[in-house]
Image (cartoon, grey):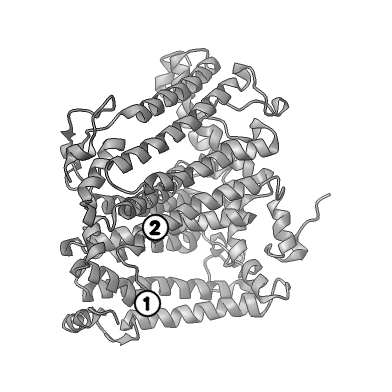
Amino acid sequence: MEAEALYPEGIERRAKKSFHIRALQGFGDTQIGPIYLGIWGLLAIGSFAITVLMIFIGYGLQVGWNPIRFMREFAVLGVEPPAPSYGLQFAPLAQGGFWQIATLFLTLTLVFWTIRIWSRATANGVRPLLPIAFGAALFLFSAIYIIHPISMGSWNEAPGHGLRAQLVWANNFSIKYGNFYYNPFHMVSIFGLLGSTVLLAMHGATILATVQYQSHRELDEIEDSTEGTHRAQLIWRWIMGFNATPHSIHVWALGLATLAAVAGGIGVITSGPAEPNWYLWACRAGITPGGIAACVPLP
Amino acid sequence: MLSYEADYRREAMGVPARASFGLFKTWIGRFYLGLWGIVGVLMGTIGSAVWLWQVVILDPTQTGNPLRNFVAGQIPVPKASLGMGIATTGADGLWWQVVVFCATITFLAWMLRQVDISRQLKMRYHVPVAYAAVLSSWVTIQIVRPALLGHWAEGFPLGVLAHLDWLSAFGYRYYNFYYNPFHALGVALLFGSGFVLSLHGATILSASGLRNKGVTEDNINRFYWDFFGYSVGEIGVHRLAFLFSVLCVLLSNLCLVLSGTVVQDWSRFWDFWNKLPIWSGFGF
């Protein structure tokens, strides 16, 4: 297909030039760019810049605008959401207002980015599956930052913006709702996550092991499979009695990765409104180690 | 049998056996047998049978329900007083040792089976190498780390929810695993693996079966250049996949094996940061 037909140039434009990084040779393609800006790219960059600005103003206030302290404490600095007493109200800037503005623009960034991927997919003649897959991550993000806080009536439920802040949130969130290891949706999500890594290793290894038979030309192999695909399929058929096809392996891939994000989001949304304590849920289901007898009745 | 399979079986029959690879070269239905298939099935069956008998049939958790036993039951680790010794009774941890032994041999046999089949199919050895990464994780947690600390009790109990309890407690035993930098890298690569898998799956599916509309890998390249500025390429994406998933597991091994041996408190691990000489020059 003619590149020009796919690339209508208006106010939307891409960088004229591309360049090569030779160090990438032997790993992947060396060409960088040309990258496309476009209205959605511009909006995404703009709103992300506001997000970063809000977070850095918050950091700056905490370290008294001292750049050395800023570097020294960078990992532990955090822009926290408003205190529970503010509920879902707007808070003064230094008491959570920066967090609210930052989170709003971070959400907008992700939405703009999704639209950007969508428009680039259709403009280049491929189906918009990447933005749909990105929607799963977007769902997990909104479950954590928007849906759960609103359902609990307080922005304080959401993570702060900072390296340590979000780890502290992950740790406390699990404990607050009775240990996430007992959350069945969390279990499914972790299954999806670990399973994704296994599948990624299997697929990457299978293709790399048959590159000399051209199995990496996946779009062609989906249409008519050749020797590379035959060998890639037979190794798994002979090992475990089952094999995917060049098409179906990517359905498995997309499905498993999506499952991890969607199940994780459901696990977050149900924590609180549907189940305030997953340990007690496991007790009622009779699946705690040591049986029902091991369950400590809470006051 | 797949339509083209007979040719490859005939070709495999011509590959000479070397060492233990190529012994018992025959197929049972769709499965390849091979020496390591026999070893794997035998040891896997024994290990699974012992586990099911101990956890599901004997009903140690007294749930009275085999399905619940499957989730709630466990074979606990040997007592610390046993050290690295061999248990003789069930109460000492004999069944844990039996299952761990059987599982280790099964996993090893499974890897050698992958080597064997890769040989028969004239493939390179990426599949067994990737599997070796996850095998190394099992060996690190159940054998190497307990050996470094001097007792089997450092391993994890063999049960579905019991090993989750172990995992949860393990993190807090060394203050908090969220402060463990290798844990952080492992988790980043774990999420990264999910992300790469999703990207790759969605990318291929988005362009598959559109050949009659003139869609080729060029469209994918342009799509990636447009929105991201870089397209890693057809082989590159699989190298990325291999690297992400294998490194994820190897870094996780590191984060576990350092805990209790070298580092006792992962928050204190960071004490060096504030003592870096660079800060004192600025009056801190």
Front one among A270 and A2: A2
Residue B89 in view (yes/no): no
Q: Residue at x 35, y 27 (%)?
A: A39
Q: In the image, is B260 to the left or to the right of A210?
A: right
Quadrant placement of the N terminus of chain B: bottom left
Residue A280 lies in quadrant: bottom right
Q: Which residue is mark 1?
A: A241
Please determine whether, in this image, residue A121 is positioned above or below residue A75. below
Q: In the image, is B242 to the left or to the right of B262?
A: left
Q: Which chain letter goes with mark 1?
A: A
Please determine whether, in this image, residue A42 is positioned above or below residue B203. above
Q: Which residue is mark 2?
A: A253
Residue B102 point in image, percent of width and height: 47, 76
Front one among A115 and B118: A115
Please determine whether, in this image, residue B253 is positioned above or below residue A20. below
* Label 1 crowd bin: few (<14), some (14–19), many (20+), radius 10 Å: some
Q: Amino acid at mark 2?
A: Ala
Indicate the secondary structure of the residue bearing disc 1.
Answer: loop
Residue A88 lies in quadrant: top right
Front one among A212 and A38: A38
Q: Residue at x 37, y 83 (%)?
A: B38
